[in-house]
Structures are given as structure tokens and as C-alpha cells.
Image (cartoon, grey):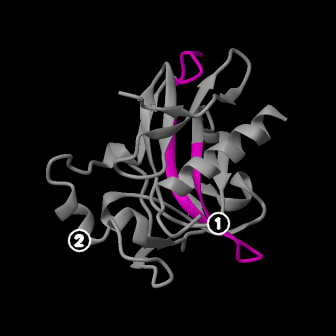
């Protein structure tokens, strides 16, 4: 129940980042301006087209069986406007994927963001946490959010992760290991 309420709060706050619209992983997705959205910052007006059937070396069925396509976000997918707008805060590959021991088990974990399309054509974005096993990377946690396949970024370290919905917003969706599982914390708003 708390998780559902937290997600609802996140979606409401997220709409404030979208006027008019309520790491090292490679991708072949595409970005394009969304004509249905009013003019605004690039991260509010560009949608990404998921095109891959494998993300971070894992087939989509291992991530979410409802997904038909997904793509990890990376600087190579961003429109030129993103770089022109980000001179004072350069875009880095680490904005889209980071590694640390998020669950404190002595094994490297990785978090990345991306976009997806389901078999029923629902679009959205995701945060994926992977853990390193002797067999390779394995899904540890997946948080997905419809309805737009838009920009998002991830920051954090072994203390926890923040999933950002826009480039300069003061609102994040925070995720941390609680000792037994990943948990969505109350959304954080920067009040400084």
C-alpha cells in the first residue's frame, strides 16, 4: 500500500517537471521531439524510442515479460539541444548508469535508466538495478513508470540511489537497500 501511494506521489510531482504533460550499457534507441508536447526544455519535449531486445546483456523476458522493446539511455541518444543546454552542468555517461555495492553484500551492483514499450504498446521509463553473479549480471530490482519514454537520470552510491525525472528538477525518487530488499523511500524534494 505504501509503495503504491509513494508511486502516486512521485507521478504527481513528476508532472510538475513536465509542463503540459501530466553507465556503460549500450543502446540503439532513438530520440525525437514529441510534437504532442508544448515547447520547453529538451528533457520535457524529447521522447525516446525503445528499440532493443537486450538490455545490459539480459533478454527482456528476464527483466519484464510484458516488454516488447527497451533501451538503456546514454549520452549518444540525446538530442544536440541537450548538450547546448548543459554547458554549465555537462552530461556524463554516469548520469545514466552507476556502479557500487548498493546492497552491501560485497558484490558489485549496477543501476541504469532507460525506456520501454510493452507488447500492448504502453510506453514508459525504468530504473534497473543489476547484481553481479558468477553467471553474469542478474536483475535485482526494476522500477518502471508509464506513460512517457522520456529522460531520466540516476545518481547515488552504496548508501542509496536517486532516480531523477528531469535534468534540473529538485525532486527525486529514492531507492535504498533495507537489509533484505530494495525499497522505494518517500520521494525527496530539495528545499534549499
Q: Is residue 109 visible?
A: no
* Residue 181 picture quarter: top right
Q: Position of residue 124 (x, y in %)?
A: 61, 63
Residue drawn at x 40%, y 79% as measured from the top left: 33
* Residue 27 picture quarter: bottom left
The label on residue 77 is: none
Q: Position of residue 36 (x, y in %)?
A: 51, 82
Q: Is 10 above or below relative to 160?
A: below
Q: Nearer the viewer, residue 122 or 128?
A: 122
Mark 1: give few (<14), some (14-19) or many (20+) Cα within 10 Å: some
Kind of element beneath mark 1:
loop
Magenta segment includes 111: yes
Q: Which residue is mark 2?
A: 80
Kind of element beneath mark 2:
helix
Residue depth check, mark 1 versus mark 2: number of the one nearer the observer: 1
The reply to whether discs 1 and 2 touch (Cβ–Cβ < 8 Å) is: no
Q: Which residue is mark 1?
A: 147
Q: Nearer the viewer, residue 155 or 33?
A: 33
Q: Position of residue 83 (x, y in %)?
A: 21, 61
Q: Nearer the viewer, residue 131 or 146?
A: 146
Residue reaching furthest to the bottom: 35
Residue reaching furthest to the right: 1
Q: Quadrant of the C terminus?
A: top left
Which region of the structure is painted magenta? 102-128
Residue drawn at x 79%, y 32% as measured from the top left: 2
In the rendered structure, the answer to whether residue 180 lies left or right of residue 51 reads right
Spatial CA distance of label 1 from label 2 is: 24 Å
Q: Is 162 above or below relative to 37?
A: above
Give whichever of discs 1 and 2 has the lower sequence position. Answer: 2
Residue drawn at x 36%, y 76% as measured from the top left: 39
Amino acid at each position: 500500500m505504501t509503495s503504491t501511494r509513494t508511486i502516486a506521489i512521485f507521478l504527481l510531482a513528476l508532472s510538475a517537471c513536465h509542463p503540459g504533460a501530466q553507465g556503460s550499457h549500450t543502446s540503439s534507441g532513438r530520440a525525437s521531439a514529441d510534437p504532442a508536447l508544448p515547447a520547453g526544455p529538451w528533457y520535457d519535449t524529447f521522447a525516446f524510442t525503445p528499440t532493443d531486445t537486450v538490455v545490459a546483456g539480459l533478454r527482456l523476458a528476464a527483466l519484464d515479460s510484458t516488454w516488447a522493446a527497451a533501451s538503456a539511455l546514454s549520452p549518444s541518444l540525446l538530442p544536440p539541444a541537450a548538450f547546448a543546454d548543459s554547458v554549465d552542468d555537462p552530461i556524463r555517461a554516469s548520469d545514466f548508469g552507476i556502479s557500487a555495492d548498493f546492497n552491501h553484500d560485497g558484490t558489485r551492483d549496477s543501476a541504469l535508466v532507460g525506456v520501454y514499450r510493452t507488447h500492448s504498446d504502453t510506453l514508459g521509463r525504468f530504473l534497473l538495478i543489476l547484481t553481479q553473479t558468477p553467471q553474469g549480471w542478474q536483475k535485482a530490482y526494476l522500477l518502471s513508470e508509464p506513460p512517457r519514454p522520456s529522460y531520466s537520470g540516476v545518481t547515488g552510491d552504496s548508501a542509496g540511489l536517486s532516480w531523477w525525472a528531469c535534468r534540473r528538477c529538485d525532486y527525486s525518487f529514492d531507492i535504498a537497500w533495507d537489509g533484505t530488499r530494495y525499497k522505494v523511500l518517500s520521494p525527496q524534494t530539495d528545499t534549499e
